[in-house]
Amino acid sequence: MVVLGLARQGKALARYFAVQGAEVIVSDLRSREQLSEQIDEMADLKLEYRLGAHPDDLLKQADLLCLSGGVPADLPLAEQARLQGIPVSNDSQLFLEATDAPVIGITGSAGKTTTTQLVGRMAQAEADRRGVRAWVGGNIGHPLLAEVAQIDNDDLVVMELSSFQLEIMTLSPQISALLNLTPNHLDRHRSMAAYTEAKARILAFQGESDSAVLGRDDPGSWAMQDRVVGRLLSFGARPHAGEGSYLENGEVRLLLGSQERRLFPVEDIELRGPHNLLNVLAACAIAGAAEMSDESIATGVQGFTGVEHRLEFVRQLNGVDYYNDSIATAPERTIAAIRSFGEPLVLLIGGRDKDLDWAPLVELIRQRVDHLILFGELAPMVERLIREAGPSERPGAVETVDGLEQAVAAAASAAQPGEIVLLSPGGTSFDEFVDFAARGERFKQLVNAL
């Protein structure tokens, strides 16, 4: 079998098959020197490497082609495999094929990692109560395929699934959540229709005994109701006639069947922003579908302050609070971040664009941002959009700098006591960093060095 890409998921795939005695070829566009660390990590396995390119004869003896997360599903080699009748798969598909444990799968354009972490905490509390184990992975943390042999049928499994994984999958989890659906990754999927279909595959292969969780307040997610073949639960701010979660009288409540369950007061939620309130509501509906106890659900929420690089508080310096929201790789996510604050904002926007619509974010910047600092490849584009939008009191100043280090220095000079410095870039990190996490780590280093 052939594995394309020696990233996190590719390594799990190669190890899974090599341990079972399969002949595994790993191909990556990077050189052996660039992959030296990964190759050393896999030194205990018998693997054949084809590096620097994907050679024409790669599929000559292959009976399976597996794609790591960053490898496009429409890669010519993948298309060639399909034409030759060679199955194309990935770690998440193979995990669902291999496990008999019920699986919770979570996807969405925004909030899926925070929601997965919340459900994972609830699952851990519930697993402790039941005397089983909880497993959290997929697009978050580590591929669960690496641990499939250790997972028992009664264990609780929570998976985050990306559109990149879903677009080639032909199985759906028993509990599938589609949190929201807004434009994202259009540089990869090329159209909103293709992106929507990729996300919708989390529902496409469910049966009548399975459950789906949709966001009532998000038009894209709620439009998927007609694709649900099993039980439908939903989440949203206001009460709803169907099963799911909602807010009432300052409490988070859950309706299952005809029973209303009062879970916990809103004050117990430590996450900032209305989008995170929806993430909590989503997690509660998902946990309800999985028949977790009220106590386990509340335990998962209490004390949870968020996921790294997602509205992460870094420090206060000279009366200024610094927040790291490097995960915001789309304008929609930056909009959610801005709306999480009432204080004056110094906003850092930058990185690489994903061919998304910036007009709503530009309008919000003109309403809410006091000082805008632009960096990276997309800086000239955003500066032009701000200028073309016409005169406005905000932002009071717009600065354009080269990179993140200069952006942090400019923010520190501009910010006044009582203001917020917010890194919420709106673009990917790939013009300067390997991923959003590396960008966020560098931001924290720079801020802590001020």
Image (spheres, grey):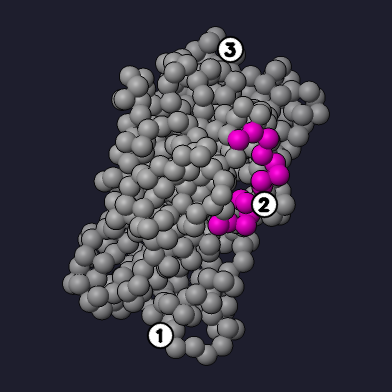
Residue at 73% over, 20% down: 60
Which region of the structure is painted magenta?
A: 217-231
Amino acid at the residue labelled 2: Ala
Q: Quadrant of residue 44?
A: top left
Q: Measuring from the top left, give residue 407's x and y in whole percent.
A: 37, 69
Residue at 25% over, 78% down: 416
Q: Measuring from the top left, give residue 283's x and y in whole percent.
A: 44, 43
Q: Of the residues tagged 1 and 3, which is closer to the observer?
A: 1
Mark found first going from the N terminus, 1 or 3: 3
Residue at 47% over, 19% down: 148
Q: Measuring from the top left, give residue 27's x and y in whole percent.
A: 60, 29
Whether residue 221 appears in magenta in the rendering, the answer is yes
Amino acid at the residue labelled 1: Gly
Q: Of the residues tagged 2 and 1, which is closer to the observer?
A: 2
Regarding mark 1 in the picture, which secondary structure is present there?
A: loop
Q: On the picture, is 450 further left or further right than 176?
A: left
Res 423 seen here: yes
Q: Quadrant of residue 217?
A: bottom right
Label 1 neighbour load within 10 Å: few <14, some 14-19, many 20+: few
In the picture of the structure, the residue carrying the numbered disc 1 is 396
Cα–Cα gap, marks 1 and 3: 62 Å
Whether residue 269 appears in magenta in the rendering, the answer is no
Residue at 41% over, 47% down: 253
Main SS, magenta region, reads helix
Regarding mark 3 in the picture, which secondary structure is present there?
A: loop
Q: Which mark is residue 223?
A: 2
In the picture of the structure, the residue carrying the numbered disc 3 is 22
Q: Quadrant of residue 75?
A: top right
Is residue 24 positioned above or below 224 on the image?
A: above
